[in-house]
Image (spheres, rainbow, N blue to C red):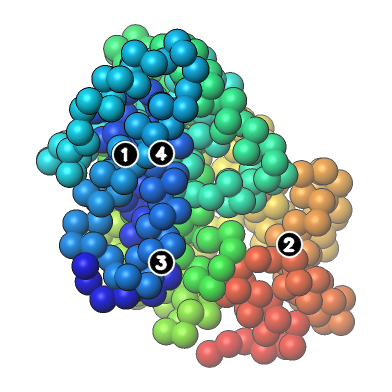
Amino acid sequence: MTGPGSRAVVEGLLRDLAPRVLAGLVRRYGGFDSCEDAVQEALVAAATQWPAQGVPANPEGWLFTVAARRRVELLRNESARRRREETVAAMTPPDPEPVSGVDDTLTLLLLCCHPSLTRPSQVALTLRAVGGLTTAEIARAFLVPEATVAQRISRAKQRIRASGAEFRMPPEAELGERMAAVLQVLYLIFTEGSTASSGAALHRVELSAEAIRLARQVHRRLPADGEVAGLLALMLLTDARRPARTRPDGTLVPLADQDRSRWDAAAIAEGVELITATLATAPIGPYQLQAAIAAVHDEAASAASTDWRQILGLYDLLEAMAPGPMVTLNRVVAVAMVRGPRAGLAVLEEAAADPALAGHHRVDAVRAHLLDMAGDREAARAHYRLAARRTLSLPERRYLESRAAGQRLQ
Protein backbone atom coordinates (compact mmCIF):
# COMPACT_ATOMS: atom_id res chain seq x y z
CA MET A 1 0.00 0.00 0.00
CA THR A 2 1.05 3.55 -0.67
CA GLY A 3 0.13 6.34 1.76
CA PRO A 4 -3.45 7.62 1.96
CA GLY A 5 -4.46 9.35 -1.25
CA SER A 6 -6.79 12.26 -1.85
CA ARG A 7 -10.33 11.37 -2.84
CA ALA A 8 -9.95 13.19 -6.17
CA VAL A 9 -6.81 11.18 -7.04
CA VAL A 10 -8.51 7.92 -6.09
CA GLU A 11 -11.61 8.76 -8.13
CA GLY A 12 -9.47 9.54 -11.17
CA LEU A 13 -7.57 6.27 -10.82
CA LEU A 14 -10.77 4.26 -10.44
CA ARG A 15 -12.29 5.89 -13.52
CA ASP A 16 -9.21 4.89 -15.51
CA LEU A 17 -9.08 1.32 -14.20
CA ALA A 18 -12.80 0.45 -14.25
CA PRO A 19 -13.14 -0.44 -17.96
CA ARG A 20 -9.90 -2.44 -17.97
CA VAL A 21 -10.96 -4.46 -14.94
CA LEU A 22 -14.44 -5.06 -16.35
CA ALA A 23 -13.06 -6.11 -19.73
CA GLY A 24 -10.62 -8.53 -18.11
CA LEU A 25 -13.32 -10.00 -15.90
CA VAL A 26 -15.75 -10.54 -18.79
CA ARG A 27 -13.03 -12.13 -20.93
CA ARG A 28 -12.06 -14.48 -18.11
CA TYR A 29 -15.48 -15.49 -16.82
CA GLY A 30 -18.18 -14.26 -19.23
CA GLY A 31 -21.53 -12.90 -18.06
CA PHE A 32 -21.37 -9.15 -18.66
CA ASP A 33 -24.19 -8.27 -16.27
CA SER A 34 -22.79 -10.14 -13.25
CA CYS A 35 -19.27 -8.89 -13.99
CA GLU A 36 -20.45 -5.28 -14.28
CA ASP A 37 -22.30 -5.55 -10.96
CA ALA A 38 -19.22 -7.07 -9.33
CA VAL A 39 -16.92 -4.36 -10.65
CA GLN A 40 -19.27 -1.64 -9.42
CA GLU A 41 -19.13 -3.13 -5.91
CA ALA A 42 -15.34 -3.40 -6.09
CA LEU A 43 -15.17 0.26 -7.08
CA VAL A 44 -17.34 1.23 -4.11
CA ALA A 45 -15.04 -0.73 -1.79
CA ALA A 46 -11.96 0.94 -3.26
CA ALA A 47 -13.52 4.41 -3.07
CA THR A 48 -14.21 3.77 0.63
CA GLN A 49 -10.91 2.15 1.62
CA TRP A 50 -8.18 3.68 -0.53
CA PRO A 51 -8.44 7.33 0.56
CA ALA A 52 -7.94 6.25 4.20
CA GLN A 53 -5.74 3.14 3.87
CA GLY A 54 -3.72 4.02 0.80
CA VAL A 55 -3.72 2.83 -2.80
CA PRO A 56 -2.47 -0.77 -3.22
CA ALA A 57 0.81 -1.38 -5.02
CA ASN A 58 -1.16 -3.11 -7.79
CA PRO A 59 -4.52 -1.28 -7.84
CA GLU A 60 -5.76 -3.01 -11.00
CA GLY A 61 -4.99 -6.44 -9.53
CA TRP A 62 -6.71 -5.46 -6.26
CA LEU A 63 -9.87 -4.41 -8.10
CA PHE A 64 -9.83 -7.52 -10.28
CA THR A 65 -9.46 -9.84 -7.30
CA VAL A 66 -12.17 -8.14 -5.25
CA ALA A 67 -14.52 -8.04 -8.26
CA ALA A 68 -13.87 -11.71 -9.07
CA ARG A 69 -14.67 -12.74 -5.51
CA ARG A 70 -17.77 -10.57 -5.44
CA ARG A 71 -18.88 -12.14 -8.72
CA VAL A 72 -18.74 -15.58 -7.08
CA GLU A 73 -20.90 -14.30 -4.22
CA LEU A 74 -23.41 -12.84 -6.66
CA LEU A 75 -23.62 -16.08 -8.63
CA ARG A 76 -24.20 -18.06 -5.44
CA ASN A 77 -27.30 -15.98 -4.80
CA GLU A 78 -28.87 -16.57 -8.22
CA SER A 79 -31.62 -19.04 -9.17
CA ALA A 80 -31.27 -22.81 -9.55
CA ARG A 81 -30.69 -22.67 -13.30
CA ARG A 82 -27.37 -20.91 -12.62
CA ARG A 83 -26.13 -23.32 -9.95
CA ARG A 84 -23.87 -25.29 -12.25
CA GLU A 85 -22.07 -22.07 -13.22
CA GLU A 86 -21.86 -21.14 -9.54
CA THR A 87 -20.10 -24.40 -8.75
CA VAL A 88 -17.55 -23.89 -11.51
CA ALA A 89 -16.99 -20.29 -10.42
CA ALA A 90 -16.57 -21.31 -6.78
CA MET A 91 -13.99 -23.96 -7.71
CA THR A 92 -11.96 -21.55 -9.85
CA PRO A 93 -9.86 -19.22 -7.70
CA PRO A 94 -9.60 -15.72 -9.14
CA ASP A 95 -6.27 -14.71 -10.60
CA PRO A 96 -4.48 -11.98 -8.67
CA GLU A 97 -4.56 -9.69 -11.70
CA PRO A 98 -5.94 -9.50 -15.26
CA VAL A 99 -4.13 -11.05 -18.22
CA SER A 100 -1.02 -8.95 -18.73
CA GLY A 101 -0.57 -6.98 -21.93
CA VAL A 102 -4.12 -7.48 -23.26
CA ASP A 103 -6.24 -4.36 -23.79
CA ASP A 104 -9.85 -5.45 -24.18
CA THR A 105 -11.36 -1.98 -23.94
CA LEU A 106 -12.35 -1.79 -27.61
CA THR A 107 -13.94 -5.25 -27.45
CA LEU A 108 -15.89 -4.10 -24.39
CA LEU A 109 -16.94 -0.97 -26.26
CA LEU A 110 -18.37 -3.02 -29.12
CA LEU A 111 -20.12 -5.42 -26.76
CA CYS A 112 -21.87 -2.47 -25.13
CA CYS A 113 -23.02 -1.40 -28.61
CA HIS A 114 -24.62 -4.80 -29.32
CA PRO A 115 -27.40 -4.62 -31.96
CA SER A 116 -29.96 -6.08 -29.54
CA LEU A 117 -29.85 -2.79 -27.60
CA THR A 118 -31.60 0.43 -28.44
CA ARG A 119 -29.33 3.34 -29.32
CA PRO A 120 -29.95 5.22 -26.05
CA SER A 121 -29.19 2.04 -24.10
CA GLN A 122 -26.02 1.39 -26.09
CA VAL A 123 -24.73 4.85 -25.39
CA ALA A 124 -25.69 4.93 -21.70
CA LEU A 125 -24.22 1.50 -20.96
CA THR A 126 -20.97 2.22 -22.76
CA LEU A 127 -20.52 5.58 -21.10
CA ARG A 128 -20.67 3.85 -17.72
CA ALA A 129 -18.79 0.63 -18.51
CA VAL A 130 -16.10 2.06 -20.82
CA GLY A 131 -16.10 5.78 -20.09
CA GLY A 132 -16.46 5.42 -16.34
CA LEU A 133 -19.08 8.20 -16.15
CA THR A 134 -21.59 8.15 -13.33
CA THR A 135 -25.30 7.85 -14.02
CA ALA A 136 -25.71 11.54 -13.13
CA GLU A 137 -23.03 12.62 -15.61
CA ILE A 138 -24.63 10.57 -18.37
CA ALA A 139 -28.01 12.14 -17.60
CA ARG A 140 -26.54 15.62 -17.99
CA ALA A 141 -24.91 14.65 -21.28
CA PHE A 142 -28.30 13.46 -22.60
CA LEU A 143 -30.38 16.22 -20.96
CA VAL A 144 -32.66 13.53 -19.47
CA PRO A 145 -33.56 12.55 -15.88
CA GLU A 146 -31.08 10.40 -13.96
CA ALA A 147 -33.74 7.73 -13.36
CA THR A 148 -34.18 7.34 -17.11
CA VAL A 149 -30.47 6.61 -17.57
CA ALA A 150 -30.47 4.12 -14.68
CA GLN A 151 -33.34 2.23 -16.32
CA ARG A 152 -31.54 2.17 -19.67
CA ILE A 153 -28.40 0.70 -18.11
CA SER A 154 -30.33 -1.97 -16.21
CA ARG A 155 -32.35 -3.01 -19.26
CA ALA A 156 -29.27 -3.02 -21.48
CA LYS A 157 -27.47 -5.47 -19.18
CA GLN A 158 -30.53 -7.73 -19.15
CA ARG A 159 -30.72 -7.68 -22.95
CA ILE A 160 -27.04 -8.51 -23.37
CA ARG A 161 -27.49 -11.52 -21.08
CA ALA A 162 -30.63 -12.64 -22.92
CA SER A 163 -29.00 -12.27 -26.34
CA GLY A 164 -26.16 -14.63 -25.47
CA ALA A 165 -23.64 -12.11 -26.81
CA GLU A 166 -20.03 -13.28 -26.64
CA PHE A 167 -17.08 -11.20 -25.56
CA ARG A 168 -15.23 -11.04 -28.87
CA MET A 169 -14.67 -8.69 -31.76
CA PRO A 170 -17.71 -8.87 -34.09
CA PRO A 171 -17.28 -10.02 -37.70
CA GLU A 172 -16.58 -7.34 -40.31
CA ALA A 173 -20.14 -7.48 -41.69
CA GLU A 174 -21.59 -6.66 -38.26
CA LEU A 175 -18.93 -4.15 -37.25
CA GLY A 176 -20.30 -1.42 -39.50
CA GLU A 177 -23.75 -1.65 -37.90
CA ARG A 178 -22.33 -0.69 -34.52
CA MET A 179 -20.20 2.24 -35.64
CA ALA A 180 -22.86 4.95 -35.30
CA ALA A 181 -23.42 4.08 -31.64
CA VAL A 182 -19.70 3.65 -31.02
CA LEU A 183 -18.91 7.08 -32.47
CA GLN A 184 -21.67 8.75 -30.45
CA VAL A 185 -20.35 7.14 -27.29
CA LEU A 186 -16.79 8.29 -27.96
CA TYR A 187 -18.02 11.79 -28.78
CA LEU A 188 -19.92 12.05 -25.49
CA ILE A 189 -16.99 10.69 -23.47
CA PHE A 190 -14.69 13.22 -25.12
CA THR A 191 -17.15 16.06 -24.55
CA GLU A 192 -17.42 15.28 -20.84
CA GLY A 193 -13.62 15.23 -20.65
CA SER A 194 -13.17 18.40 -22.66
CA THR A 195 -15.76 20.45 -20.77
CA ALA A 196 -16.87 18.70 -17.59
CA SER A 197 -20.56 19.10 -16.88
CA SER A 198 -19.95 19.59 -13.16
CA GLY A 199 -17.23 19.97 -10.57
CA ALA A 200 -14.26 22.20 -9.83
CA ALA A 201 -12.22 21.42 -12.95
CA LEU A 202 -13.06 22.41 -16.52
CA HIS A 203 -11.30 19.35 -17.95
CA ARG A 204 -11.26 15.66 -17.15
CA VAL A 205 -8.17 14.83 -19.14
CA GLU A 206 -8.40 11.09 -18.43
CA LEU A 207 -11.75 10.98 -20.26
CA SER A 208 -10.74 13.01 -23.30
CA ALA A 209 -7.46 11.09 -23.56
CA GLU A 210 -9.31 7.75 -23.39
CA ALA A 211 -11.78 8.86 -26.05
CA ILE A 212 -8.92 9.87 -28.36
CA ARG A 213 -7.12 6.58 -27.71
CA LEU A 214 -10.23 4.56 -28.57
CA ALA A 215 -10.95 6.71 -31.62
CA ARG A 216 -7.42 5.98 -32.87
CA GLN A 217 -8.07 2.26 -32.42
CA VAL A 218 -11.30 2.44 -34.40
CA HIS A 219 -9.61 4.55 -37.11
CA ARG A 220 -6.83 1.99 -37.47
CA ARG A 221 -9.49 -0.70 -37.93
CA LEU A 222 -11.59 1.39 -40.37
CA PRO A 223 -9.16 3.86 -42.03
CA ALA A 224 -11.50 4.55 -44.97
CA ASP A 225 -14.51 5.46 -42.81
CA GLY A 226 -14.99 9.21 -43.17
CA GLU A 227 -16.94 9.67 -39.96
CA VAL A 228 -14.38 7.76 -37.90
CA ALA A 229 -11.65 10.00 -39.32
CA GLY A 230 -13.88 13.04 -38.82
CA LEU A 231 -14.48 12.25 -35.17
CA LEU A 232 -10.80 11.68 -34.48
CA ALA A 233 -9.97 14.95 -36.25
CA LEU A 234 -12.62 16.79 -34.22
CA MET A 235 -11.19 15.45 -30.97
CA LEU A 236 -7.63 16.41 -31.89
CA LEU A 237 -8.57 19.89 -33.08
CA THR A 238 -10.63 20.55 -29.95
CA ASP A 239 -8.15 19.06 -27.49
CA ALA A 240 -5.37 21.12 -29.09
CA ARG A 241 -6.83 24.22 -27.43
CA ARG A 242 -6.92 22.72 -23.94
CA PRO A 243 -3.63 24.29 -22.69
CA ALA A 244 -5.05 27.76 -23.32
CA ARG A 245 -8.61 27.18 -22.08
CA THR A 246 -7.81 27.79 -18.41
CA ARG A 247 -5.45 30.00 -16.42
CA PRO A 248 -3.17 28.55 -13.71
CA ASP A 249 -5.92 29.00 -11.10
CA GLY A 250 -8.40 27.05 -13.25
CA THR A 251 -10.29 30.09 -14.52
CA LEU A 252 -12.02 29.52 -17.86
CA VAL A 253 -10.67 31.47 -20.86
CA PRO A 254 -13.15 31.86 -23.77
CA LEU A 255 -11.98 31.08 -27.30
CA ALA A 256 -11.72 34.73 -28.34
CA ASP A 257 -9.34 35.51 -25.44
CA GLN A 258 -7.09 32.45 -25.63
CA ASP A 259 -3.33 32.69 -26.21
CA ARG A 260 -3.12 30.78 -29.47
CA SER A 261 0.62 30.28 -29.11
CA ARG A 262 -0.24 27.79 -26.35
CA TRP A 263 -2.36 25.62 -28.64
CA ASP A 264 -0.91 22.20 -29.55
CA ALA A 265 0.41 22.78 -33.07
CA ALA A 266 1.14 19.07 -33.67
CA ALA A 267 -2.43 18.06 -32.77
CA ILE A 268 -3.81 20.81 -35.02
CA ALA A 269 -1.63 19.69 -37.93
CA GLU A 270 -2.74 16.06 -37.46
CA GLY A 271 -6.39 17.04 -37.21
CA VAL A 272 -6.29 19.30 -40.25
CA GLU A 273 -4.55 16.62 -42.30
CA LEU A 274 -7.15 14.04 -41.26
CA ILE A 275 -10.19 16.19 -42.06
CA THR A 276 -8.73 17.49 -45.31
CA ALA A 277 -8.07 13.96 -46.55
CA THR A 278 -11.43 12.51 -45.53
CA LEU A 279 -13.50 15.39 -46.96
CA ALA A 280 -11.86 14.74 -50.30
CA THR A 281 -12.48 10.98 -50.32
CA ALA A 282 -15.51 10.05 -48.20
CA PRO A 283 -19.19 10.97 -48.07
CA ILE A 284 -19.69 13.99 -45.79
CA GLY A 285 -21.11 13.33 -42.33
CA PRO A 286 -21.81 15.29 -39.13
CA TYR A 287 -18.50 14.60 -37.42
CA GLN A 288 -16.59 15.70 -40.49
CA LEU A 289 -18.54 18.97 -40.56
CA GLN A 290 -17.83 19.60 -36.89
CA ALA A 291 -14.15 18.87 -37.49
CA ALA A 292 -14.14 21.29 -40.42
CA ILE A 293 -15.60 24.00 -38.14
CA ALA A 294 -12.93 23.28 -35.53
CA ALA A 295 -10.24 23.48 -38.22
CA VAL A 296 -11.42 26.94 -39.32
CA HIS A 297 -11.12 28.14 -35.71
CA ASP A 298 -7.72 26.51 -35.18
CA GLU A 299 -6.19 27.81 -38.41
CA ALA A 300 -7.18 31.44 -37.72
CA ALA A 301 -4.19 33.49 -36.59
CA SER A 302 -6.43 35.50 -34.27
CA ALA A 303 -10.04 35.66 -33.15
CA ALA A 304 -10.58 38.71 -35.36
CA SER A 305 -9.38 36.87 -38.47
CA THR A 306 -11.75 33.89 -37.99
CA ASP A 307 -13.73 33.14 -41.15
CA TRP A 308 -17.19 33.27 -39.58
CA ARG A 309 -18.97 33.16 -42.93
CA GLN A 310 -17.40 29.81 -43.67
CA ILE A 311 -18.29 28.60 -40.18
CA LEU A 312 -21.92 29.71 -40.62
CA GLY A 313 -22.10 27.86 -43.94
CA LEU A 314 -20.78 24.70 -42.26
CA TYR A 315 -23.31 25.05 -39.43
CA ASP A 316 -26.10 25.43 -41.99
CA LEU A 317 -25.05 22.09 -43.50
CA LEU A 318 -24.68 20.49 -40.06
CA GLU A 319 -28.11 21.65 -38.89
CA ALA A 320 -29.70 20.25 -42.05
CA MET A 321 -27.87 16.92 -41.71
CA ALA A 322 -27.88 16.38 -37.93
CA PRO A 323 -30.06 18.94 -36.11
CA GLY A 324 -29.75 19.17 -32.36
CA PRO A 325 -30.01 21.72 -29.53
CA MET A 326 -26.26 22.32 -29.16
CA VAL A 327 -25.79 22.61 -32.93
CA THR A 328 -28.56 25.22 -32.95
CA LEU A 329 -26.97 27.23 -30.14
CA ASN A 330 -23.57 27.20 -31.80
CA ARG A 331 -25.13 28.29 -35.09
CA VAL A 332 -26.79 31.22 -33.26
CA VAL A 333 -23.34 32.53 -32.33
CA ALA A 334 -22.16 32.18 -35.93
CA VAL A 335 -25.25 34.09 -37.15
CA ALA A 336 -24.46 36.90 -34.70
CA MET A 337 -20.83 37.08 -35.82
CA VAL A 338 -21.84 37.34 -39.49
CA ARG A 339 -25.12 39.30 -39.36
CA GLY A 340 -24.91 41.10 -36.03
CA PRO A 341 -26.04 40.38 -32.46
CA ARG A 342 -29.68 41.38 -33.00
CA ALA A 343 -29.98 38.84 -35.81
CA GLY A 344 -28.47 36.24 -33.50
CA LEU A 345 -30.92 37.12 -30.72
CA ALA A 346 -33.87 36.73 -33.09
CA VAL A 347 -32.69 33.22 -34.05
CA LEU A 348 -32.07 32.41 -30.38
CA GLU A 349 -35.66 33.19 -29.44
CA GLU A 350 -36.88 30.51 -31.82
CA ALA A 351 -34.22 28.03 -30.70
CA ALA A 352 -35.00 28.54 -27.00
CA ALA A 353 -38.48 27.10 -27.57
CA ASP A 354 -36.93 23.62 -27.90
CA PRO A 355 -37.97 21.67 -24.74
CA ALA A 356 -34.51 20.04 -24.63
CA LEU A 357 -33.02 23.46 -23.91
CA ALA A 358 -35.49 24.49 -21.22
CA GLY A 359 -33.52 25.79 -18.25
CA HIS A 360 -30.16 24.99 -19.83
CA HIS A 361 -27.49 27.43 -18.73
CA ARG A 362 -25.98 27.69 -22.23
CA VAL A 363 -29.13 29.38 -23.55
CA ASP A 364 -28.75 32.14 -20.96
CA ALA A 365 -24.99 32.33 -21.55
CA VAL A 366 -25.45 32.79 -25.30
CA ARG A 367 -28.24 35.33 -24.79
CA ALA A 368 -26.05 37.28 -22.34
CA HIS A 369 -23.13 37.26 -24.78
CA LEU A 370 -25.27 38.56 -27.65
CA LEU A 371 -26.90 41.22 -25.47
CA ASP A 372 -23.42 42.29 -24.39
CA MET A 373 -22.38 42.52 -28.06
CA ALA A 374 -25.49 44.61 -28.77
CA GLY A 375 -24.63 47.06 -25.95
CA ASP A 376 -27.47 46.10 -23.61
CA ARG A 377 -25.29 45.73 -20.52
CA GLU A 378 -28.04 45.51 -17.88
CA ALA A 379 -29.92 42.72 -19.67
CA ALA A 380 -26.64 40.95 -20.35
CA ARG A 381 -25.69 41.02 -16.66
CA ALA A 382 -29.06 39.54 -15.66
CA HIS A 383 -28.63 36.60 -18.05
CA TYR A 384 -24.98 36.06 -17.08
CA ARG A 385 -26.16 35.74 -13.46
CA LEU A 386 -28.95 33.34 -14.44
CA ALA A 387 -26.53 31.19 -16.44
CA ALA A 388 -24.09 31.17 -13.51
CA ARG A 389 -26.79 29.90 -11.15
CA ARG A 390 -27.77 27.11 -13.53
CA THR A 391 -24.38 25.65 -14.43
CA LEU A 392 -22.87 22.86 -12.32
CA SER A 393 -19.34 23.63 -13.53
CA LEU A 394 -17.43 25.80 -11.08
CA PRO A 395 -15.04 27.27 -13.70
CA GLU A 396 -17.98 28.21 -15.92
CA ARG A 397 -19.83 29.69 -12.93
CA ARG A 398 -16.85 31.82 -11.97
CA TYR A 399 -16.43 33.07 -15.53
CA LEU A 400 -20.13 33.90 -15.90
CA GLU A 401 -20.21 35.70 -12.56
CA SER A 402 -17.19 37.75 -13.59
CA ARG A 403 -18.97 38.79 -16.79
CA ALA A 404 -22.07 39.69 -14.80
CA ALA A 405 -19.85 41.96 -12.71
CA GLY A 406 -18.50 43.57 -15.87
CA GLN A 407 -15.02 42.08 -15.46
CA ARG A 408 -12.66 40.25 -17.78
CA LEU A 409 -10.54 37.86 -15.75
CA GLN A 410 -6.84 38.36 -16.38
Residue at label 1?
A: 69
Residue at label 2?
A: 361
Q: Which mark sits nearer the N-terminus, 1 or 2? A: 1
**Foreground label between 4 and 2:** 4
Q: CA distance from mark 1 to mark 4?
A: 8 Å
Q: Which mark is residue 38?
A: 4
Residue at label 3?
A: 242
Q: Which mark is residue 103?
A: none
- Choose between 354 and 157: the one closer to the eye: 157
Percent x, y for residue 153? 56, 33
Percent x, y for residue 69? 31, 39
Q: In the shown orientation, is residue 104 left or right of residue 244? A: left
Q: Which mark sits nearer the N-terminus, 1 or 3? A: 1
- Choose between 231 and 106: the one closer to the eye: 106
**Foreground label between 1 and 3:** 1
**Foreground label between 3 and 2:** 2
**Foreground label between 1 and 2:** 1
Residue type, label 2: His
Q: CA distance from mark 1 to mark 3?
A: 41 Å
Callout 1 secondary element: helix
Whether label 4 touches label 2, CB < 8 Å: no
Counting other residues with Cα less than 10 Å from the Cα at mark 3, is it few (<14), some (14-19), or many (20 or more)? some
Callout 4 secondary element: helix
Asked if 372 appears above or below 48 in the picture, the reply is below
Residue type, label 4: Ala
Residue type, label 1: Arg
Callout 3 secondary element: helix
Q: Residue at x 41, y 38 (%)?
A: 38
Callout 2 secondary element: helix
